[in-house]
Amino acid sequence: MKNRFRYQIPTLLILTASLGVTYKLWQHEQHNIAIDQQKSFDFNLREAIGSIEQRMAAYEQVLRGTQGLYAASDVVEREEFQVYINALKLGANYSGIQGVGIIPIVAQAQKEAHIAAMRKQGFPSYAIKPESHQDVYAPVIQFEPSVGRNLLMLGLDHYAVPSRRNAMEQARDSGSPAITGKVTLLVDAKSDAQPGFVMFLPMFKKGTRSDTIAARRANINGWVIATFRMKNLMAGLYSRRVSMADITIYDGVEMTPQTLLYDSQAPDGKLRSIAHKDKKFIEATEYIEVGGRTWTLAIRSLPEFDVLQGKDNSRLIAIAGIGLSLLLTMLSWALLSGRARAMSLAQKMTQELRESEARFRHQAQHDSLTGLPNRALFSDRLGQALAQAKRQHKRLALMFIDLDAFKPINDKLGHHVGDFLLKEVALRMQQHMRASDTVARIGGDEFVVLLPSIEDAQDALVLADIIRNAISEPFEMPDGTILNISSSIGVAVYPEDGLDETQLSRNADSAMYYAKQSGRNTVQAFQAQVTF
């Protein structure tokens, strides 16, 4: 009994130690996954905000172009305005804009003359609606494209609607575009109604001042108006990465069903109640300014987002670690009871456990197919390289590489062919890397390269072109088949193109997409004026 108790103590110690090591490895992997997911989520959030801001800026330019048309002409005929708006091709180039129109100021004393003039222009049933008696009216006199329900806009008095009048006065006083809060467009049928908003841009009398509030109020001549449906505006706005998240937008800072403008996960196009949202893994809230109003953007990750991040080795580490711990414990018991033989076997198993732990650690930081560093390890190396470059005032370069037309090959010829191509591409890139450089696979057919020390941007572009040429060389499959692929490469250089990991990665990614848009099989350096 005494000898048995003597064996139990070291056996329990071994079990405790091995389980402790397993827990630490599992915890480390969970930590890396959380960091990687948070970084990717933050990038997606910034991409979502940037996409909205860029689209709204483009819509603002449509109104400013119309403002400029009237400012540059003594008289703009109806046909000229119609040709100008039709040339913009709103449906194809500016999804979400239902139409653009002109609103003059009509005083009470001018009302009858205004109506008569409009009827004389070919609108015999024209009237200012809704019928009201007020000092000033602001009716729509032209709204293009003049088709379908847009025809109902003619004569609508926006001064008669308090929320719209407030936005018009805000635009007048600021001299800048202003939007209403959440509205249902007056021309929408009840069966097709959806949240929207209206944007106004002031127009001032030609040759007058507009540099002060008083001057703008005195010289206001009318407004350019554009109406928007939120669902149409957001259609096709986001990349595949951002589509892995549930995005909701609210008018103002209150997140309630009454202020809900848009929900990317709404079933059959109808806004669902926020009370029924499922709890998501990661979520964040940001505020953006649009036309003088605050929009609240809430983004929550979906299960597809976790799948996109890559392989989760934490469960494998836990299962393997527990199994090895139990196996080691049982063997330790047998070895300790076997005296000399047990001591020898225990040393052997301990070594095997260490080697297994080393393999798991390697698997946690490397891509299982190509053996290249994964996103987590690459992010760590990039952070260290940036810190060193800042201390030593050196440059470094970051490349984003995407294989062109890889998916059709993978789908048509099978995943085994795609996997073989990915491994061969990885080998070719490694052949051109210095010992200090890092090439990693961050998912699918996307690779990244870190050059931690370069003299100038040209060094990175030269190497990028070498890599592009290497990838474009024919690949011979095991069965003798010859395949050809190419790559699009984006290059960003520290510090010119970014001062931190997020900015540098975003700009390299932007350059890569620009390379694809430029015809593929090209190398593009980041250009600040090119955005996506």
Image (cartoon, rainbow, N blue to C red):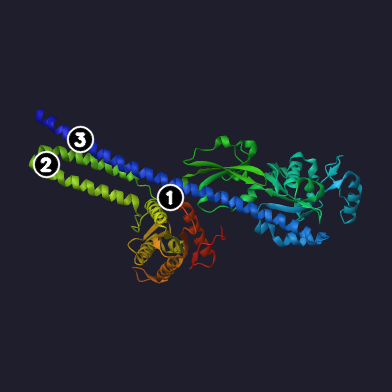
Please give the residue where the numbered disc 2 appears in the rendered image: 342
In the image, what residue type sits under mark 3?
Leu
Of residues 327 and 249, the one drawn nearer to the viewer in this rendering: 249
Q: Amino acid at mark 2?
A: Ala
Q: Nearer the viewer, mark 2 or mark 3?
A: 3
- What whole-number distance in Å separates the C-alpha atoms at marks 2 and 1? 45 Å
Q: Callout 2: few (<14), some (14-19), or many (20+) C-alpha neighbours within 10 Å?
A: some
In terms of secondary structure, where does tag 2 sit?
helix
Task: Indicate the secondary structure of the residue bearing disc 1.
Answer: loop
Give the residue drawn at x 47%, y 56%.
504
Task: Answer above or below: position of 462 versus 192.
Answer: below
Which residue was labeled with disc 1?
Answer: 309
Q: Does residue 188 appear in the picture of this structure?
A: no
Asked if 479 appears above or below 300 in the picture, the reply is below
Question: Farthest residue toward the left?
Answer: 340
- Which structural element holds mark 3? helix
Front: mark 1 or 3: 3
For label 3, the residue is 13
